[in-house]
Amino acid sequence: MSDTAFLDVLVAVLGGAIRVGTPFLFVSLGECLTEKSGRINLGLEGVLVFSAMAGFGGAYLTGSPWAGVLLAGCCGALLALLHGLVCSLPRVNDIATGIALMMLGAGLAFYLGKPLIQPQAPQIPAIALGGWSDSPAVQAALQINALFPIGVVLALLMGWAFMNTRWGLVVRMVGDSSDAARALGTSVNGVRIAATTAGGFIAGLGGASLSLHYPGSWNEGLSSGQGLIAVALVIFARWSPVRCLGAALLFGGAGALGPALQSVGVSGYYYLFNAVPYILTLAILVWTCSPKRSLKGAPLELGVSR
Amino acid sequence: MARRAWHDVAEAFALPLLALGGALLLFGAFVWFGGHNPLEVWQLLFVGAFGDAFSWQNTLQRAAPLMLTALCVALPARAGLVIIGGEGALVLGGLACAVVPYFVALPAGLAGTSVLLLAAALAGALWIALAGALRQFRGVNETISSLLLGYTAIALFKHWVEGPLRDPASLNKPSTLPLDEALRIGTLGSYDVHWGLAWGVALCLLAALWLSYTTNGFATRIVGGNARAARLVGLPANRLIITACAIGGASAGLAGGIEVAAVHTSANASLIAGLGYAGILVSFVARHNPLAIIPVAILFGGFGAAGSLLQRRMGLPDASVQVLLGFAFVLILASEALRGRLLPFSLMPQRAPIPTAKPA
């Protein structure tokens, strides 16, 4: 590989970190909020696919990408609300419900999204940050999804709110000790349902980013497990919204590696490079988990961290 | 007084049936909103699944791999682990089955086929045992790791099938070299159902026997019920859990091997059809009971068979069955909340009256 090719790959990976990482960012923020309240929602994968379809459909029908984004968030919230309600029933396991929601969300999206595979929808505008450079590769790589800055602000806001507001404290309390919450007269299920629903809304924005910016169309292979990777990503970020931002960019870069290498002619290992995020996640889990102690920073009520 | 045994049994049948009925109703309402006649949809679902000999054969054909992939969820679940990466074990099993003839010349007939299926089972067993080992030795959540391993397995499968192992003659649909005619799995007698069904039923029965009537199976259930108590009485929890994972993975790998040797004749993308994910649902509906998996797999195989009929006759999207399954899964889990409260109060087992203290 020549020097320029190496530089091209580097630029493409850095640009891809934002482009591919934006859905990761939103889904992991949604999952972070849900898990802070003491529940795990594996169904965000279903939420992501369903809201991607809804966002595309909304933008296609109204002609406004932002209406699509809003619809995506609302549809995501609706599906997550179902998770919150079902999990509030006695003896219902949140992990199993998540798997069910994954199936239901994907099924509904494929069913309702059948007529949306052909048409083109208006896209979320891109912010060009590459004007300072003459290189078209750099300019193309720095076409930033307009949702990305919103996600950055949201991550910082959530990080601040968890530490400094009454709401953040209530969510953390419910996630750390449901007994303490009950003793203070807080409705544990109520807070969890609210957190799950809000998390679904945030994850839905990630779906909109998939179908309305990159790749920018609706088809049945749109999401390849980003919703699940986000669950592992939250563990990697140790339940901190600000660290979620860094983790999402890292995973976005890993996801952009395969296409970037293919564009400079290294195509023999295309599928293996696409598997890098999964292997990376697994490696991080193996590295950070330990059977001896529960993870630092994990909400104590969470089943997954043990 | 103890709860009456018939009460538990009645509930064990009534709850899933109620949930499935509810899912069918919801699905009817769903297609009705889309402007289709729900009565016609329900009728087609039944006709497509169990209407005549042809649909029965189609149904049983689809049920066979579901039984095996459901075991991949059920057996680890009985040992206390939620494994949902059966799809990965299935595709690797299929790949292993298709790849063995590249390296060894196999004897034709039963002996050669057995080697193929053994390779398939081994590949699946290793993959799921890895998820179990990561959980036991590193504390990695097995649900997430098995799923990530599943995606990795699919990527490996695509890489090898479209790269180094590709049959140059397969132009539009990258495949491995087709299996030799003599190595394929035939059909049961004159019916259009392959031997995979017999494998599925036999393994479900064996698994049920293992769990209920062997010391090892009993110990596995103890570990699944309460791992700490199991350790306290000296049971080798790690070994039992990883064994259960390996057996489950072997079943899913076998499912992939059988699909390749009986249906597709070579490993290609048709193998990645979501059988592993459907198996999760089957196992949950059967409450991880291997005996119950057999009828449930036949029922869901029937839904799958009816799906193509719905698509042809009514123009419904091919995902309509997935919507039905999604409704069914959510309702099955929600119905757990009704356990112990389903029957009218008068039929509920009476508690013994609290003895009143008598003055001495």
Image: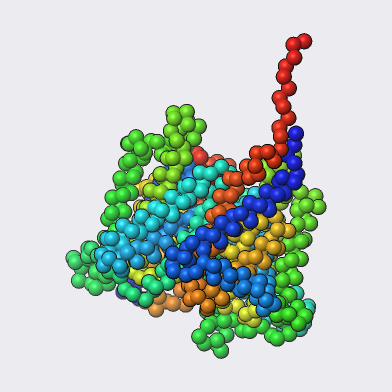
Q: Position of residue A11 (x, y in %)?
A: 31, 67
Q: Is residue A211 depicted above or below B314 in this figure?
A: above
Q: Residue furthest left?
A: A132
Q: Determine the residue positioned at 44% across, 42% down.
A: A192
Residue B32: x, y in percent? 47, 65
- Horizontal placement of A32 versus B65: left or right? left
Look at the image and tell me in which quarter the C terminus of chain B lies: top right
Q: Is residue B137 visible?
A: no
Question: Residue sitting at 42 percent across and 38 percent down?
Answer: A172
Looking at the figure, which quarter contains the N terminus of chain B? top right
Image location (x, y in percent) of residue B113: 74, 77
Tell me: A78 left or right of B14. left
Considering only vertical position in the picture, is A167 above or below A140?
above
Place residue A9 in its image quadrant.
bottom left
Residue B205: x and y in percent read: 76, 61
Q: Is residue A8 left or right of residue A225?
A: left
Judge from the rendering whether residue B159 lies leftward or rightward of residue A195; answer left or right. Answer: right
* Residue shown at 75% from the left, 37% from the top: B2
Q: Nearer the viewer, residue A179 or B354?
A: B354
Which of the colour schemes (rainbow, by chain, secondary structure, one colour) is used? Answer: rainbow
Q: Toward which corner of the image does residue B253 lie, by quadrant?
A: bottom right
Q: Nearer the viewer, residue B354 or B208?
A: B354
One can see residue B306 in this view: yes
Task: Name the foreground residue: B112 vs A174.
Answer: A174
Q: Kindly identify the residue that appears in the image at 55 percent across and 86 percent down.
A: B170
Question: Which of the pair B82/B64 is nearer the observer?
Answer: B64
